[in-house]
Amino acid sequence: MIKAVLTDIEGTITSLSFVKNILFPYSKNKISEFIWNHFETDERIIPIIDNVLIEAGQSTTEKLKIDRAIDILLQWIAEDKKATPLKELQGIIWEEGYKEGDYTGHLYPDAYDKLKELKEKGFQLYVYSSGSVKAQELLFQHSDFGDIRDLFSGFFDTKIGPKQEAESYSKIAKELNLPPNEILFLSDIEGELIAANQAGMQTTQLLRKEDYPLKELPKNISRSILNSFEGLYLESVK
């Protein structure tokens, strides 16, 4: 029996366009100025810069390392690289955008309604996204429906492991203290669903018409596939 629901964000409960057309360009346009304006006053910035250079396998002088790190970060954005230091920095920059009211966190209305329903039915709700935990919390704090962080019991990002590796889902199940088969994972990405299946989780794929208008549904697979959350039904947790 399913007792917990673990959900992806981008393409699952929020649109691909919100992330790709609003959040990513915002961080890209702000990243250089933000680093130079905050690296001396925000203690989070220099460790991120150091981790960028470490992950890129580079070293440089103190004088040049910020310039080099910015170049690497912009390259990672262009490549859509799921690098943890980039995700951490984006979360910090997006926080400023949310606070300034430059945007709110998009959520599909049917996803919001279903999450509320599942919470009321007794399910523990968790999030696993390539975006940092901070970025996740900011989206839900400043969502189109207000601050909905209380719907969730926990958040996971790539610090626990890559999203297309089964071990990551095994670690999450251990953190939740649940057998993997009592966890339902929701995502739009097939590779993530396969990894979750390999770890023993149950899975459902969301292929929204807004995000995947021409995508053919996979055939001969065991998981369920939905175009919205309206088709997701789970019995209440007893």
Image (cartoon, rainbow, N blue to C red):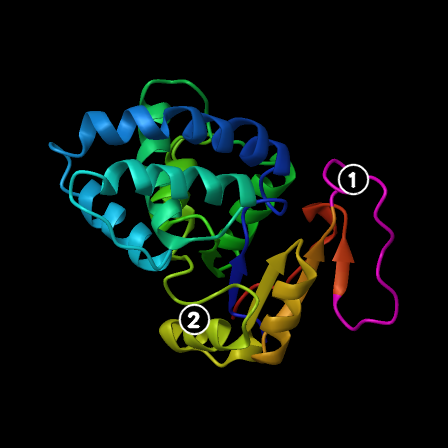
Q: Is residue 144 visible?
A: no
Vertical relation: 184 (above or below) 136:
below
Quickly name the residue at label 2. 172
Q: Secondary structure at mark 2?
A: helix
Vertical relation: 220 (above or below) 206:
below
Nearest to the observer: residue 79 or residue 195: 79
- Does residue 160 appear left or right of residue 111 in this picture? left
Q: Quadrant of residue 198?
A: bottom right
Asked if residue 165 is among those painted magenta in the image, a careful observer would answer no
Residue type indicated by callout 2: Ile
The residue stretch that appears in magenta:
208-223
Vertical relation: 35 (above or below) 75:
above
Nearest to the observer: residue 115 or residue 87: 87
Rendered location of residue 217, percent (x, y): 85, 56
Nearest to the observer: residue 130 or residue 64: 64
Quickly name the residue at label 1. 209
